Amino acid sequence: MDEKKLKALAAELAKGLKTEADLNQFSRMLTKLTVETALNAELTDHLGHEKNAPKSGSNTRNGYSSKTVLCDDGEIELNTPRDRENTFEPQLIKKHQTRITQMDSQILSLYAKGMTTREIVATFKEMYDADVSPTLISKVTDAVKEQVSEWQNRPLDALYPIVYLDCIVVKVRHGGSVINKAVFLALGINTDGQKELLGMWLAENEGAKFWLGVLTELKNRGLQDILIACVDGLKGFPEAINSVYPQTHIQLCIIHMVRNSLKFVSWKDYKAVTSGLKAVYQAPTEEAALMALDKFAGVWDKKYPQISKSWRTHWENLNTFFGYPPDIRKAIYTTNAIESLNSVIRQAIKKVSLRGSHLHRDFQSVSITDIHSPTYRR
């Protein structure tokens, strides 16, 4: 199966992931794609020219041989490229090798940990007695980065009923110091009810202006309509969204509102205030919610007047979910999907050493490799 067909199969399969077996099968497919891409990069390095490019010698590509190997998720069928003179000796997966467990730790994870290409060469020699050149390491990592670029720029569906737009601040190692970076995330719920990571971007800090660029990019990639955008309370955010998607309803994140409300609440009042706010956003109707907010204000305004004031100020963008059935409401106002994604991103960041001018490229390569899928599946 060629790479184009495999990509199409992976995209189709990702939409129907329902069981653990489905996840394992999908993971095997992605491993196959990554490994075969890396092997082809090795052969390109060996021959000295790209496929269909002018030849630099007499040796050329000569099709593929097939073999079954064992990876962490089970067996996969690999198509290993061959050369006419039979001088190609792949180093990532040798000719008679039948196991590739911990494949991701061989090059990509070494790269993710901040190793230079020459340090990876030395590690391969020490651990595997494999002679690989710095040029080869660069070709292999660049081949995977090309897939990352394709993922980040892939066409999107025309409609996503719900899109979560969130930004997390993470600490990353940059040179000899630790710095803060803002990770912008767009997580969509498609018309089949499946979660799909639409993209992620790295910036110095969060701002509505940057989000405007993100939204414009999403529209240019084919996303023409969003029914509900779930966002935090960043100033200017709703206006940025509606400038690109004027018909989109804004839903401020309830969890963010609750957290902000509790910032200055004393510990002894914490449980009671939380319960009072829950009565607002879990009310059966908007009318009942406003009555619950009035009741909350009557109890707590003397001590914490800023809480009810903030909820009333933002009510126009807090009340959106009341226009939908109860089951859909929970999907709108809870943040389980985006919180789970944030956790994966933070885990990926822990092992990343981002380098100089390649900061954004390296981050996406490592993080998307950790996520393992254009369709986020947790």
Image (tube, grey):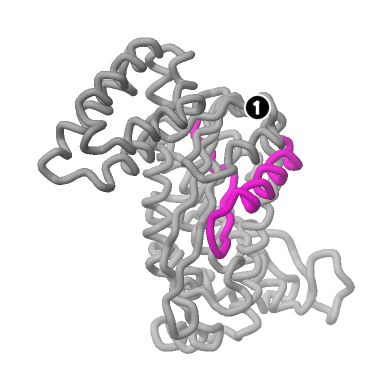
Q: Which residue lies under the disc numbered 1? A: 159
Secondary element under disc 1, as helix, strand or loop, is: strand
- Compared to residue 362, the image places residue 299 above or below, namely above
Q: Residue at x 49, y 45 (%)?
A: 166
Left or right of residue 279: residue 32: right
In this image, 169 relative to 80: left or right? left
What is the residue that sits farthest to the front in this orientation?
302
Q: Is residue 206 left or right of residue 7?
A: left
Part of the protein shown in magenta: 194-222
The foreground one among 189 and 213 is 213
Front one among 254 and 177: 254
Residue ID at (24%, 23%): 298
**Observer-nearest of 108 and 66:** 108
Q: Position of residue 52 (x, y in %)?
A: 85, 64
Amino acid type, label 1: Leu
The question of residue 180 being in magenta is answered with no
Q: Residue 284 at what x, y percent from top left?
A: 33, 11
Q: Residue at x 44, y 16 (%)?
A: 322
Query: Is residue 204 on the magenta stretch?
Result: yes
Query: From what the image shows, is residue 241 above or below residue 2?
Result: above
- When the figure is inspected, residue 48 is found, relative to residue 348, above or below; the finding is below
Residue closest to the eye, 293 or 255: 293
User: Which image quadrant is residue 308 in?
Assistant: top left
Residue 90 placement (x, y as % from top left): 58, 73
Quarter in which the C terminus is drawn: top left
Badge 1 crowding class, 10 Å Cα cut-off, few under 14, some 14 to 19, many 20 or more, is: some
Residue drawn at 59 percent across, 36 percent down: 238
